[in-house]
């Protein structure tokens, strides 16, 4: 009997032994997970690029100048030249993946950036370049190899905490101190 899991709306916390530099010490929000695979966005890896620089690069005037210095994040190694906006509320954009039954959306269309630039909406956003993706069964295999911990996501961690506190706060949802995790996994 095959057990199916659905981690949509969960955090993936990279275990200390994670050797893939793309995911070492990352906190990833899973926006979709089904029999075809999974996709998410790393939410604790800011890049050197600011939103001001990104908006200039994509030729959208940024009227909301208070957003200019906010970082653009490395969302993952897939399509790293393309923007993805994780936001709350989900809204009605041209290309939005609504996350399960939540008010969270992951949008890849330009209209969300235009609204952000002019109106400052959606109110809570994380702008990333690229996403994290897994083919069918790949994430389940990585979980079986103890590469990740999972916990239902609390989006206040993403949208309201400083980036350096996010991984620790997500671990706190499990009652675990990241600093005390062993980098050696065992199987019972």
Image (cartoon, rainbow, N blue to C red):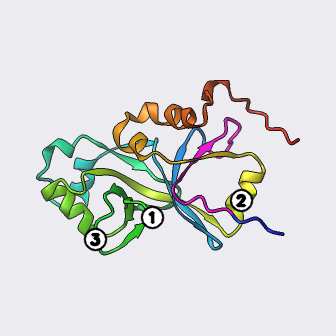
> What residue is shown with label 3?
92
Numbered tag placed on residue 101 in the rendering: 1
Q: Is residue 164 visible?
A: yes
> What residue is shown with label 2?
140
Question: Looking at the image, which residue is at 59% across and 43% down?
Answer: 13
Mark sitting earlier along the chain (2/1): 1
Question: Looking at the image, which residue is at 33% across and 63% down?
Answer: 90
Residue 56 vs residue 105, the one in the foreground = 105
Residue 108 vs residue 33, the one in the foreground = 33
Mark 3–mark 1 Cα distance, whole angstroms, equals 15 Å
- Residue 115, located in which quarter of the rendered image? bottom left
How busy is the neighbourhood of tag 3: few (under 14 within 10 Å), some, or many (20 plus)?
A: few
**In x, y percent, where is residue 36?**
63, 73
Residue 183 falls left or right of residue 101: right
Mark 2–mark 3 Cα distance, whole angstroms, equals 31 Å
Mark sitting earlier along the chain (3/1): 3
Residue 85 falls left or right of residue 5: left
**In x, y percent, where is residue 143?**
72, 52
Residue 30 falls left or right of residue 90: right
The segment highlighted magenta reads 5-22
Q: In the structure shown, which secondary structural element does the residue marked by tag 2 occupy?
A: helix
Residue 120 vs residue 45, the one in the foreground = 120
Mark sitting earlier along the chain (2/3): 3
**In x, y percent, where is residue 71?**
32, 43
Residue located farthest toward the top when viewing the structure as drawn: 180
Q: Which is the main secondary structure of the residues drawn in magenta? A: loop
Residue 162 falls left or right of residue 66: right
Q: In the structure shown, which secondary structural element does the residue marked by tag 1 occupy?
A: loop
**In x, y percent, where is residue 56?**
21, 55
């Amino acid at each position: 009997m095959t057990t199916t899991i659905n981690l949509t709306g969960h955090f993936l916390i990279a275990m200390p032994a994670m050797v893939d530099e793309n995911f070492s010490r990352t906190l990833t929000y899973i926006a979709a997970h089904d029999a075809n695979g999974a996709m998410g966005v790393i939410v604790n890896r800011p890049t050197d690029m600011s939103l001001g620089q990104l908006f200039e690069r994509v030729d959208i005037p940024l009227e909301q100048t208070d957003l200019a210095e906010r970082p653009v994040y490395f969302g993952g190694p897939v399509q790293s030249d393309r923007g993805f906006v994780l936001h709350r509320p989900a809204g009605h954009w041209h290309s939005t993946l609504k996350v399960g039954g939540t008010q969270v959306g992951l949008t890849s269309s330009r209209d969300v950036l235009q609204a952000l630039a002019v109106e400052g909406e959606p109110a809570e956003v994380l702008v990333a370049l690229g996403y994290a993706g897994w083919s069918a069964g790949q994430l389940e295999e990585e979980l079986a190899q103890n590469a990740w911990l999972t916990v239902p996501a609390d989006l206040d961690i993403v949208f309201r905490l400083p980036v350096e506190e996010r991984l620790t706060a997500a671990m706190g949802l499990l009652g675990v101190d990241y600093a005390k995790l062993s980098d050696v996994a065992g199987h019972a």
